[in-house]
Structures are given as structure tokens and as C-alpha cells.
Amino acid sequence: MTRRILLALLVLALLGAGGFWYAGKPGGEGRSATAASPGGGARGVPVVTRAAEVKPMPDRISTIGAVQPIAAIAIKARVDTVVEAVHFTEGQEVKAGDPLFTLDSRALEAQLRQAQANLERDRANLDKARNDMRRYAELLRTNAVSRTQYDTAVAAAEALEGTVKADLAAVEAAKVSLSFTRIAAPMDGRTGAINARPGSMVRAADATPLVTLTQLRPIMVSFNVPERHLPAIREAMRQGAPLVTAGIPGDRGTAPAEGKLTFVDSQVEQQSGTIQVKGEFPNADTRLWPGQFVDVVLTLRVDPQAVTVPDTAVQTGQQGRFVYVVKPDDTVEVRPVAVARTQDGTAVIAGGLKGGDRVVVDGQSRLYPGAKVAERGPDRSNPDKGPEKGPEKGQDKPSGDKSNAHPPNADGRPAEGGKKTEANAAAPGGAS
């Protein structure tokens, strides 16, 4: 029994030793696995590449804004009286000068007539006083009257001149008060809710307006931008009013409204670190509505010859940002780059690349300097298309995610298992 057990153990040991020897034999399975590993054979690491493009690239700031009317006027009564007529409907578009309300004017008309009567009376008294003054002047030359009597006549005439001036002012005031009973639109706009109907008593001291008139054309959009953009905004304002677009969220079938930047606040909000700016829009179609939130894009300038790559091509290492550039022999090199800005999935490269350079945009996780690569998928002209099939069993899934990219070790080999090693710090694109 013991002999059988020992014999079985011996057979197992011999089989294990033979398998180990075969796996390590040149041309065996171990060799095949090595050849199939990334960079180990002629096939290369599967990646997606894209050529750097030179094209006009706008410098934009995207944010959320609120639509505000340039003017919203509360129409109020300026005299205490009763509403006689309303000449518009709620929500109606009106022009400057269109009648809105007619108020009861009978009491004010009577006040005007009284002021005019007082004026006529005092003018008659003034004429009499002036005649008396002239007669006293003639009598004074013959000493028929005293100097005191003459002075009294002159003072009476001058006093009545002042009274007539006061009467004229009273007449003008009565006319102005009477004009307040005819309320017209002070500007073009759209009316809101009517708060006073015919027969309603209105007073000048009322807090609630008769109606609110809101200007819709043109209209403003107010929004805040980080203070770091202030120098660029001021420079753009010196070159001319920058373009501002406002799109209604969810409305993908209509092009955003276009306007011009017209206002930059005089100070930065310290709590938020932002500055308020405003754009003016013609709003001919009244698409923008007061109080509405809109998607705002402020275009500061346009770089006519910007070098651009997809932002997934840019990796970050201990020595800064870099990209993997594919050389003519289908091997890669690490190229440090300076990124001016990133917007809408595109990185604008300020230095380190030129138009036509082929960069890796997906599959960087297993690359190192000198690694051989192969374009993943049948269509090289459209690298955004994913592979026809998933990665082979046992292979890591290539990804352009910067967080999954493992920069090479100093000796040019990929880091084991994607973990950091001490040699990473010496690599051109060592992971940070």
C-alpha cells in the first residue's frame, strides 16, 4: 500500500518536472505567451491614434446665465382718483405713446379752471396797480402827493406781479396733474398683469402698480465668470465687443441667440471669486424671456492656427503633461507638451506638437518609450470607433483614461501590474 502511494507521488513529480521543462523550451507554450504579450511581438500594443490638427480654435467660456430686461417699469397712478378706462389687455405688446389707462379727471379739471380764474383776477389787479403807480409818479413831480404815497403804489404793483407769477405756476401745476389722468406707455414693451380695473380707486401712494411694462427688445443676459478670465475679457473688450451666445436648455433644434458683451462689473465678488458680466441681445423673435436661465458661451478670441488633439491624448506625469507620439516605424516616444486650454473634448497645444503628428488617444495604459503599437480597429481614419471585438482573454482593456495609464519604468519596461515603482520617477512620463 505504501509502495503504491510512493509510486504515484513519483509519477506526479515527473509529470510536473516535464511540464515545467516544456513550458520553458524555445518555441514552446511559454514562448508563445511571451510573444503574445503587449510589445512582445510584431503585432504591437493595440491603440487608437489621431493626427494633430491645425485649425481655427475659439477661446470660449461656458457658463449659466439669467435673462434680464434692460428696463421693467412699474406704471403707477400719480394722482388720487378713480380708473375710468383700460386700453390694453394683459400680455399685450405696446409701443411707446400707446394709451394704457384713463383716470377720472373731473376734479382736476375744476382745479385747473379755478387756477385760471385766479390768474385772470390777479392780472386785472396788477393792471390797476400799475396805472396807480404811473399817476402817483406824475403827481410826485408837482408835489401833489408825498414820496411815501408813491412808494406805496410801487410796492402794491410789484406785489401783484409776484401774485400773477404764482397764479401762472398754479395753472401749470393743474395742467400737469390733469395730464396724469392719461397714462401712456413710456417705451415699447409687453404688459403684465392688470392690477386696477375701471372703477378702482387708485392713489399716488399705492405700492402696487397698475401694471408692469417690460422691455423685451433688446434684452440682457447676466452671468458670472471666474476672476482669472478678467484680463482676457478686458483685452477682448478693447478689441471690440466679444460675441456671446445664449441657448435655451433642451432646445437643440434652434441655433443659440447671438449678442455682444456690453458690461463688465467694476469689482470682483470676493466670496465667490467671480465677476458679473452682461451681454445684450437684439431678441427680435423674443426667444429670450426675462427670468429664464440659459446656456451662455462667451467667445473671447479665435486662434486661427491652433494645434489641437483630443484631450484623451494628454497624460500627466511627475514632469508635467505629455503625449505618446507614434513614429513612422510604429513605435512610440514620450513627447512633453504645453496645453494652452481644454474645451469641448479638445486640447489646444501651445508647444511640443505640430500638425500631422500622430498621437495615441486610447490604449496608453501599457505603453512605454519604444513600444511597438498597432492601430486598433479596421478604420484608421476614424479612430474614435471602438474595436470590432473586445480584447482577448487575459489582456487588459486598453483605455485612454489618464487615471489608468501607467508610465514606463526607467529601463523602458512597463510597470508590473500597473503599480508604481521607484524607477517611475526617472521616466519622462512617470505617473504622478
Image (cartoon, rainbow, N blue to C red):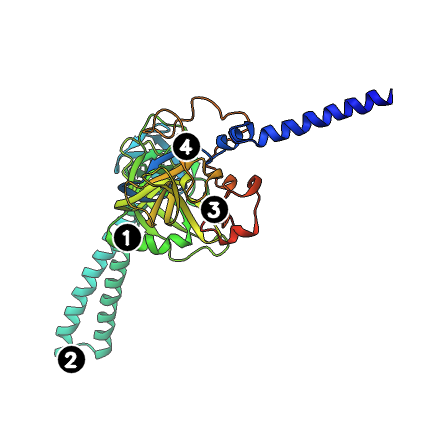
Work out whether mark 2 precedes mark 3 in sequence or the reverse, and give the earlier one: 2
Residue 45 image-quadrant placement:
top left
Question: To which residue does mark 4 refer?
Answer: 42
Q: Using the numbered discs, state the Cα–Cα distance from disc 1 to disc 4 in whole angstroms.
A: 56 Å
Q: Using the numbered discs, state the Cα–Cα distance from disc 1 to disc 3 in whole angstroms.
A: 50 Å
Q: Residue at x 50, y 44 (%)?
A: 413
Marks 2/1 in contact by CB < 8 Å: the verdict is no
Mark 3: give few (<14), some (14-19) or many (20+) Cα within 10 Å: some
Work out whether mark 1 precedes mark 3 in sequence or the reverse, and give the earlier one: 1
Position of residue 284 measured from the top left corner of the image (x, y, whole percent): 26, 33
Question: To which residue does mark 1 refer?
Answer: 237
Name the amino acid type tagged 3.
Gly
Position of residue 358 measured from the top left corner of the image (x, y, whole percent): 33, 39
Q: Residue at x 30, y 35 (%)?
A: 257
Q: Nearer the viewer, residue 228 or 355?
A: 355
Left or right: residue 180 compared with residue 320: left
Question: To which residue does mark 3 refer?
Answer: 412
Name the amino acid type tagged 1.
Met
Q: Nearer the viewer, mark 2 or mark 1?
A: 1
Q: Nearer the viewer, mark 1 or mark 3?
A: 3
Question: To which residue does mark 2 refer?
Answer: 143
The answer to whether residue 159 of the structure is visible from this angle is: yes
Q: Residue at x 29, y 42 (%)?
A: 57
